[in-house]
Amino acid sequence: MSMILALKDEDTVGARSNDPAIIGRDLRRSFGAGVAVNHVLKEFSIEIQPRELTLIVGPSGCGKSTLLAVLSGLLRPDAGSVTVLGTELWALTQPAIDAFRLAHCGFVFQGFNLFASLTALEQVILPLNYSGVSQEHVVEQAQRALVDVGLADRAHLRPAELSGGEKQRVAIARALVKDPQLIFADEPTSALDKENGRLVVELLHRAALDRGATVLCVTHDPRLIDYADRVVRIEDGRITNDNRRVRGHCVDGVKL
């Protein structure tokens, strides 16, 4: 626990400046072996700026979920380096990587990843039990997170009693409750209807604008593009287009 608290309190270069929050250099990742090997990332390099919502888009199988996992410390690359908030992530031991994620990262997944037996409030409380928050403040902090996502009146319900959109908002509350500097979202709206998809992407964008978080989202959902500060398209494990949205205008002639 002391390692987690030390990581949370540490002032890193990326956390306090306009330097990139995430830097991936010459990343390679393959799956399979021999003639069946699939080279998913091919000397892939990218920098993710702080306090922005960055979208990684592309067709299924292009490597975007693999990239998210590599940049967030969930999947070790075959080669290359990842620097997150000034820390060379894959130079750490596995326990230190786990502690780093707990201290600095929130995750939102397509499948919600909620526990069937826990209420919405209990789902949000769960990560606080491992993050050093004093027990007297745990419930209060979790309740505030549910208020922020518009689910204060659903806190007592379990996943089977919630709609798909509500489940994803619980997952976002769980990701935000620690006030992380980094939020990683993997296809967060693909299973949702138009209105719930809009609510979810608005919450992610607000996390960047209001909380100052670095939000990295992989998606093939075009509804998210209007909310993004930057859209990076990848195909076959490489960047094919990189556009930044500036005050609602187009960049490089591409409407975002």
Image (spheres, grey):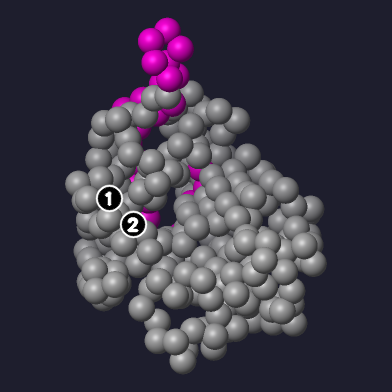
Residue 133: x, y in percent?
Answer: 40, 82
The circle drawn on residue 81 is none
Query: What residue sits right under mark 2 in the picture?
Result: 98
Magenta span: 32-56
Residues at badges 2 and 1 in contact (C-beta under 8 Å)?
A: yes
Residue 151: x, y in percent?
Answer: 70, 76
Residue 206: x, y in percent?
Answer: 56, 69
Residue at image position (52%, 66%) is 175
Query: Which residue reaches farthest bottom?
Result: 136
Q: In terms of depth relative to the viewer, which is nearer, 97 or 214?
A: 97
> Gap in Å between the C-alphas at discs 2 and 1?
6 Å
Query: What residue sits right under mark 1 in the picture?
Result: 94
- Whether residue 50 is in magenta: the answer is yes
Residue at image position (50%, 37%) is 64
For residue 168, side relative to residue 252 (left or right): right
Relative to residue 145, is residue 56 depicted above or below? above
Disc 1 crowd rating (10 Å Cα; few below 14, some 14-19, many 20+) is few
